[in-house]
Image (cartoon, rainbow, N blue to C red):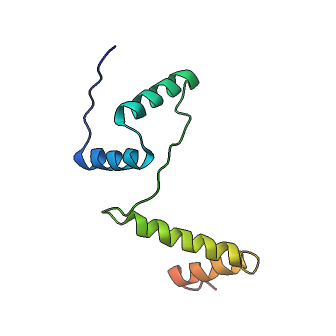
Amino acid sequence: MRTVSIRLEDSIYEELSEMLDAMGQTKQTFYETFTRTALRERSIPFIISAPVTKTRNGNDRKMEAFQRLEISRKKNAESLDYEKEREEAMNAKYGSID
């Protein structure tokens, strides 16, 4: 058996630790699973996710805002005139071109 050593920024290391703890995984299990799957599939074929927690850089607020926008978009999808919305946005940004 070989030992692999990698260097990670402190913030990335801590965030990885928090995510793996939430998933009930160790770093060793994570890297072994990742490596075995990548070798078997000959690619990086999987996504492992953990519950989103409050982060220090505000990503949680961005995601919440995006989710609210998506809900609003889906509710209003049939009633929106995208050409009109685009024209109004262009006019607001660049002024009316007539």
Quadrant where the C terminus is found in the figure:
bottom right
- In the rendered image, the vertical position of residue 93 relative to residue 61, given as above or below: below
Residue at image position (62%, 73%) is 71
Q: Is residue 4 above or below residue 61?
A: above
Q: Position of residue 73 (x, y in %)?
A: 65, 74
Give the residue drawn at x 55%, y 24%: 42
Q: Nearer the viewer, residue 85 or 71?
A: 71
- Using residue 21 as the reference point, say whether residue 45 is left or right of it: right
Q: Hey, which quadrant is residue 80 in on the image?
A: bottom right
Residue 46 shown left or right of residue 26 in the figure = right
Q: Which residue lies most toward the front here?
A: 24
Image height check: is 68 above or below 20? below
Name the residue: 55% across, 74% down: 68
Return the residue found at the far right.
78
Residue extending farthest to the top is: 1
14 or 62, nearer to the observer: 14
Residue 89, how many percent across, how many down? 58, 80
Q: Position of residue 55 (x, y in %)?
A: 34, 61
Q: Where does the image place residue 75, in percent across and percent down from the top left?
A: 69, 77
For the N terminus, give its image quadrant: top left
Compared to residue 65, the image places residue 18 above or below, namely: above
Q: Nearer the viewer, residue 66 or 34?
A: 34
